[in-house]
Image: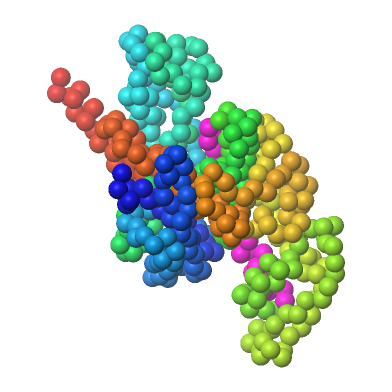
Amino acid sequence: MSQNARLIAGLDIGSHKVCCFIAERTDSGKARVIGYGQHISSGIKYGSIVDMDQTEQAIRRAVHQAEEMAGESISSVVVSLSGNSVRSQRTDGLVLLNNQEVTEEDLERLKTEACAQFLDGDREIIHAVTSRYTLDGQGEIRDPRGMLGNRLEAVVNIVTAAKTAVRNIVRCVDRCNLDVAEMVVQPYASALSCLVEDERELGVALVDIGGGTCNIAIYVEGTLAYTKVIAVGGDNITSDIAHGLSTPLNHAERIKTLYGCAMAQSLNSDDNIQVPKVGENEDTATGQISRAQLTGIIQPRSEEILEMIRDAIEQSGFEAAIGRRVVLTGGTAQLAGFKELAEVVLDKTVRVARPFGVEGLTDLSGTPQFATAAGLIIFGKNELKPKSKFQLSLGSGQMSEWISRVVKNVKESFQTT
């Protein structure tokens, strides 16, 4: 395998930052991060591109930093996708086997049949995740390959996004002279790097709270059952601090990170904080605020965010399936007192997760705000392999076009017979 083929690059395009991880495949089949870079993202809002030029510059700088650290150049990336256009819907798939052995091709035909129902003109299929196989009435089948039967059914979770959102991301990456190898929705990527196998099997909700969005992934019986993106995040807390204290946004972010607390009961001190004022000399014109007063600004917004997450979990229909298990990750999850507040608002057992599953993570690159980037590397390691003509690319933005061609060919074959 050539050195270039051994490389995997993940590009997390977030509302607060753009991050790039470069990893290499090891001889043991794992992935080791050899370079990473990040840059402030000012061209993204709530997960969607609002300024193409600024987003392009952020991508270029993050990739350049990662390439310099790795000592390698990359030509393609696995890219994250977020924004409130992301939808998750479950449907049934069915194929008839004529009492033959179930093959990989049959599984892909089943998935294609399920996806064909979602070929809407303005939607792009990003993922199709299959679960709950049933063969001739026998359910609870995890992997039917090699089994004999006549009627194979399954439940398929179809994740789609607006075509315009997908194409804008692809175009922006293309302007940076990079190809999009795969596209992965952010909550799915974060779940890959933060959930342990027992959590996936027992049922769990993974919530990645970033700067502009809350990304939810629900796993049931070992597979991704539901995803949702909520257009609210840590930047809303920063904005509240900036407005409440009349301080610049960059200082509000710093104050939140260094002194912020999401729950009054979690405060361990009530020190005074120096607050620069908007439009005045930052070295001389400052005010003061206590940590208790700062918490009085942060806690209401944190509660609102968590209430929206709670409502989304309830509306998913999987609240009973996940039991009391919730895993938090993302930068906002590190805010002091946020975990404790989440346990109260969500009425769940909550843990804050750091990414794992890839080698080479440091104390900086292995923090929760890099969960998506690490998950993109894991996805790339598992999925960037040669595929047969029958296989679907589970993260590709071209899935809808592929399915359209398959369905068209099938229809034409029937018309000519």
Quarter of the image with the C terminus in it? top left
Asked if residue 79 can be seen in this view, the reply is no
Magenta highlight on residue 177: no
The x and y percentages for residue 46 are 53, 59
From this view, report whether residue 252 is shown above or below residue 69: below
Quadrant hosting residue 76: bottom left
Magenta highlight on residue 241: yes
Q: Nearer the viewer, residue 315 or 178?
A: 178
Q: Is residue 100 left or right of residue 327?
A: left
How many numbered callouts?
0
Q: Which residues are magenta?
A: 223-245
The x and y percentages for residue 101 are 35, 13
Residue shown at 43%/44% (left/top)? 26
The x and y percentages for residue 9 are 41, 53
Q: Nearer the viewer, residue 3 or 177?
A: 3
Residue shown at 39%/62% (left/top)? 71
Q: How is colour applied across the structure in the image?
A: rainbow
